[in-house]
Amino acid sequence: MNNEITYYFPCQRWLAVEEDDGQLSRELLPVDESYVLPNEDEEGGGGGDNNPLDNLALEQKDKSTTFSVTIKTGDKKNAGTDANVFITLFGTQDDTGMTLLKSSKTNSDKFERDSIEIFTVETLDLGDLWKVRIGHDNTGKAPGWFVDWVEVDAPSLGKCMTFPCGRWLAKNEDDGAIVRDLFHAELQTRLYTPFVPYEIILYTSDVFASGTDANIFIVIYGCDAVCTQQKYLCTNKREQKLFFERKSASRFIVELEDVGEIIEKIRIGHTNTGINPGWHCSHVDIRRLLPDKDGTETLTFPCDRWLATSEDDKKTIRELVPYDIFTEKYMKDGTLRQVYKEVEEPLDIVLYSVQIFTGNVPGAGTDAKVYITIYGDLGDTGERYLGKSENRTNKFERGTADTFIIEAADLGVIYKIKLRHDNTRWCADWYVEKVEIWNDTNEDEFLFLCGRWLSLKKEDGRLERLFYEKEYTGDRSSNCSSPADFWEIALSSKMADVDIDTVTGPMAAYVQEGPVIPYYVSVTTGKHKDAATDSRAFILLFGEDDACSNRIWLDYPQGKRGFNRGSVEEFYVAGLDVGTIKKIELGHDGASPESCWLVEELCLAVPTQGTKYMLRCNCWLAKDRGDGITSRVFDLLDAMVVNIGVKVLYEMTVWTGDVVGGGTDSNIFMTLYGINGSTEEVQLDKKKARFEREQNDTFLMEILDIAPFTKMRIRIDGLGCRPEWFLDRILLKNMNTGDLTMFYYGDWLSQRKSKKTLVCEMCAVIDGEEMMEWTSYTVTVKTSDILGAGTDANVFIIIFGENGDSGTLALKQSANWNKFERNNTDTFNFSDMLSLGHLCKLRVWHDNKGIFPGWHLSYIDVKDNSRDETFRFRCDCWLSKSEGDRQTVRDFACADNEIRDELEETTYEIVIETGNGGETRENVWLILEGRKNRSKEFLVENASRQRRAFRKGTTDTFEFDSIYLGDITSLCVGHLAREDRFIPKRELVWHVKTITITEMEYGNVYFFNCDCLIPLKRKRKYFKVFEVTKTTESFASKIQSLVPVKYEVIVTTGYEPGAGTDANVFVTIFGANGDTGKRELKQKMRNLFERGSTDRFFLETLELAVARLGLAVDHGW
């Protein structure tokens, strides 16, 4: 054997269940003999402290892959097993071989029913993992085993894969197999930034009692506050006793997040547990591979401090900054280059003085343990326990200020803090007024206005709160963790220019290049006994020109999981704007037999297009049901399409004033008014600590296309621990056009302060100009001269005009001490109101309280004092539960409304905009289609050179006399060739961009967004038809509909068991001309709303042009 070659395979690892990672087998790599054989220059061989093999651990870790294997045992009878379980991982290049799963990180008694076990499997490169084989040896008293799923996480690869099973591994169950091959569910694969290995060596000082039995943790920080998770270094108590002894070096190889090229600081600390928890740390070395893996760098972090509650400053957490860097790099010629250098401009270690002010309100103090985390642009402090106050022995008492010293690496500009307590001891509730932080090095000061309870019993029941620095104006959405949070950011203008390549982590799957719009999705699950699923559902949208969205996941809010049998689940999501949607795919990520799902109905609403699609599905999405597929594509040609009104995306910014107690816990409601109508009252979402003192909150709103805006009404309900709110101003920004509208208020919404009102109206300000005028109204109420006409009830009115409505006005302060008496006239004044213009309608009602609530009203006069104009609303009827038709709510049209006879003929103004895609010298003809009639042909002869129409980028206006057509619904447009000229090729098509038609008598305007090339033809049978895109109804037209109408409301109660109700039932009918207000459905001497019954009611109001109906009950029905 002349050419003998010896291979050396170092291990230096335990093969034991109770040691290291619990593995009983290892895969080893060969190394150069210089790492193994003793150095001849050293006496006694290589047994010194500098063992060359110690330096191989980091490199070996990098060449191997550590898998964290999680196994879920099913929640079925006898699902657990006593057998010996093994697993084999298969990759595209190799497999692990059969690996016994002996040492679980979670349970000593493994594989019990409904349990989760975690194991570590370390191996060399397998390639791409594609299959898992799991089985057992069928030994023990109860060997049968039901496996739900297996999850394999490889941090070094940044991939976590799920292998569904949902079957028995048992001789007497299922098909009798005890070994199964599982394949990964691609849709359940989770990708993240790959981890990298770090070698961490912690040196314990040569000081008396310097060792510790506590568990040490570490956090590593890079630039821009990028950091790893907090990692505990010992995996069990045995290791805690073996490591961190006096004058020792404790070495750990861990995989953590990559913090970048520069490590700026580390944080070390311990749990303060064990017999001797105090620890004196000399220094810490961190070694890691260079980016190209041709060498390593070692950073040294000096410490020489105690981490103990009985030594030094009594702190168990230290932040350390690097002092020097030792780099070893192999050059191209094979030589090893070693470089030692000091760190340039390391972060300073700074003492921060934190002063916490406890409020001076009853019960404000706390005896609980309080913790704080301070965030700056260079990093954070981690959570610190506020144990010892520098100025008081009894901390956090009512009306006091406590000062604490926190040592940390320089945080830069501090912008946020997190406060929490553990809710222990007798008096745990705590009211924090404010927090002040000083940087003792440069004397920077940061103020945090709090004014909140940390309590399970008060306000919103939270023990943890975030507070931002008083002058901070940056983005407060960095804490988003869910897709719903992310989409709100992605849709906002602040994210309009974001580089999608920079978005990482769980949100990366939701990012797609292109315009993003919101969608509303609702899914109805069938009622079959197996219809439900807890799988994660998704949709894909297919539009024009092969446009397709990414998967849009239908994620549940926190605490809810799965589609229950017979349920209707609604989701607010966002995705790529694919134009007109042609198809939709619905599916889920479940791959096991138990993840079947029966979908009954799918609805998709696109508010920016004003369209809702409703699909009757009635199909299974399951591996073992129906046709065996878990996703299905639906053609929207099969859907029922409903017009829901086009909505526009607006970015809304709300400023809360800088006054004490300015924030609120109340619910906030908004109503917007514009030239083209008004919105319904909508609630502003108060998530993520919005509407706090001196804070501006930005979020998205979908608003009907009623711009330009004229005014905004804001109302709060006055509930919660902080029922008042100081509203400064509100800004609306159109996301499509960038148009800005500002609304100023600068006062309290409160029942106790300032104007003592919970409702305010703000005039819209566009380009510095107010869109409405201010006025005052005098309301004169005449009670009839008949027996029992007076009332003791409280009376309210709403005034409607061409500029919206007044909101609810309470008729309280009259010149008469006893209001609304028989044949009396009462006068009420309302000052500082936005002008409603010409008044058209009035709603009056009372609350039916008092000894004699019934009321017979003669009329109401409303005088607009700035215009010196009076509007009369005649009633001459009862508002009573016992008289007349027993209604207490009435709507009246203004007696001055001019109701004109229906027109026979009228004039239409037609405005045609030609686009840049093609002009014409030829003739154009149009036919208008209305709800009442169809017009004759209107021919535009394009013969004159001096006044030639339809040039590129121009607008032409024409007038056309016709019979009255009613509301115009569509338009026929033709491009007709003249017979007297040769037609150049460039004029064979005409680009019509928009057409606007105005009915001149009433002033109604109809918009058609055509944007179409119309070919030139010599016959009239060739034309294009366009549907009306938008209609603006004039005030003169609207008041034509304000005539009294009696509506019959028929309510049929279902036959389901318990379907009837004894609750009070209310109805609101909505239409194009407003709504009825909330009306109670009630009849004397009848038991209403019983199972299977039909009840009829009559409501008298003004014509609404009914569009929808709302029902409300006191409790279930």
Image (tube, rainbow, N blue to C red):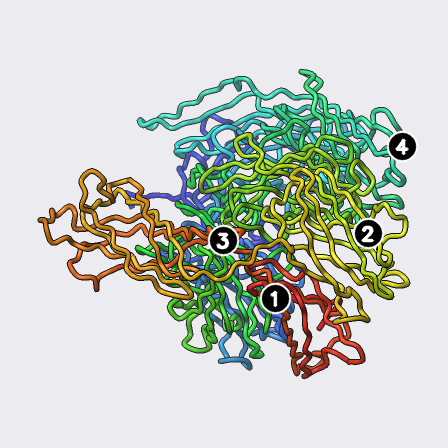
Q: Earlier in the sequence, mark 4 or mark 1?
A: 4
Label 3 SS: loop
The location of residue 37, given as percent across then percent down, is 45, 36
Q: Does residue 602 show up?
A: yes
Instruction: Give the position of the C terminus as an image quadrant.
Output: bottom right
Q: Is residue 589 left or right of residue 855?
A: left
The location of residue 97, given as percent across then percent down, is 44, 60
Q: Earlier in the sequence, mark 1 or mark 3?
A: 3
Q: Is residue 969 left or right of residue 879?
A: left
Label 2 SS: strand
Question: Quadrant of the rendered structure where residue 402 is?
Answer: top right
Q: Earlier in the sequence, mark 2 or mark 4?
A: 4
Q: At 73% across and 43% down in the image, what residue appears?
A: 464
Reading the image, the residue beneath label 4 is 394
Taking depth in this image into account, of 722 and 441 the one nearest to the observer is 722
Label 3 is placed on what type of residue? Glu
The mark lying in front, picked from 4 and 3, is 3
Taking depth in this image into account, of 363 and 692 the one nearest to the observer is 692
Label 1 is placed on what type of residue? Leu
The mark lying in front, picked from 2 and 4, is 2
Label 4 is placed on what type of residue? Asn
Q: Earlier in the sequence, mark 4 or mark 3?
A: 4
Q: Earlier in the sequence, mark 3 or mark 2?
A: 2
Reading the image, the residue beneath label 3 is 1033
Q: At 53% across and 19% down in the image, what residue appears?
A: 343
